[in-house]
Amino acid sequence: MDSDLALELSVIAVLQFCASVSQFVAGIGGAMLFTVGWNLAGIASLCSGQIMDISVYQTIQALVAIPLQAFNRRKQCNVPFVGLACICWGSAELVGTMLLAAVEKSQSPWFKRSLGIMMLLIFFWETSNHWASAVAPFSDRRSSAKQSSPSAKDCLDTFCVWRKRNLLWTISFGLGAGFTRGLFNVPILALIVFSLYSGMPTNEWR
């Protein structure tokens, strides 16, 4: 086997393992870890570092992993939400991938810079949220946790897609996550916004 191919396959294996662990434990972050790691490995001349390659590898991985995840969690699946989100996601990801192919041909340095800017925005946003939570008085944190904790009745409720607010959230989530996944292979910004502000119960989201 060619040494360069063996090295690139090793990089893929290590990154995919780390991304999968993050995805299964936290529910998000797998694609972001893979993308950042792949770009860093590209800088170190361990692989191509091209985002188009990431898109291909992650698509192959998703074709294997997602059906298994869906089968294992079929009892907790909100079918209307998943169905509508997948339709919007797939359509937007196709558009994002087509744009990715066009941008990759142009070799514009601003493409990866825009990805880096998005990553920095996510980092600072998450850091500010955790910092605000850490410096808040303990009594305020307890009160906030009590208010945000779902009651027994809330736990029985599901995220009804056909309510106007939830319908708009679902469509926006699918389009936003699909487009950024197709363009950058990183849908985490849409995932974070939806999980924080849509009102979907935490257990159902997981």
Image (tube, helix red, strand yellow):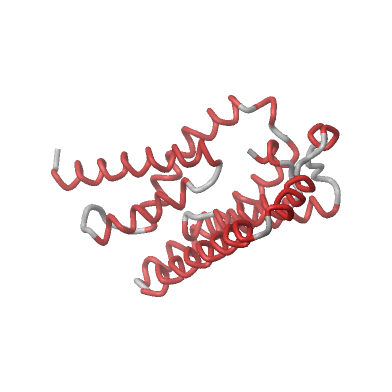
Query: Which residue is located at x 28 percent, y 55 percent?
Result: 41
Q: Quadrant of the N terminus?
A: top left
44 to the left or right of 17: left
Say left or right for 17 vs 73: left
Relative to residue 125, is residue 185 depicted above or below? Answer: above
Residue 45, percent from left and from top: 21, 58
Q: Position of residue 60 (x, y in %)?
A: 43, 40
Q: Quadrant of residue 134?
A: bottom right
**Image: 17 above or below 181:** above
For image coordinates 55% across by 54% down, the residue present is 188
Q: Residue at x 50, y 62 (%)?
A: 123
Q: Position of residue 161 (x, y in %)?
A: 79, 45
Image: 101 above or below 86: below
Tell me where residue 78 appears, x and y as whole percent: 73, 35
Q: Is residue 49 left or right of residue 194?
A: left
Name the foreground residue: 46 vs 134. Answer: 134
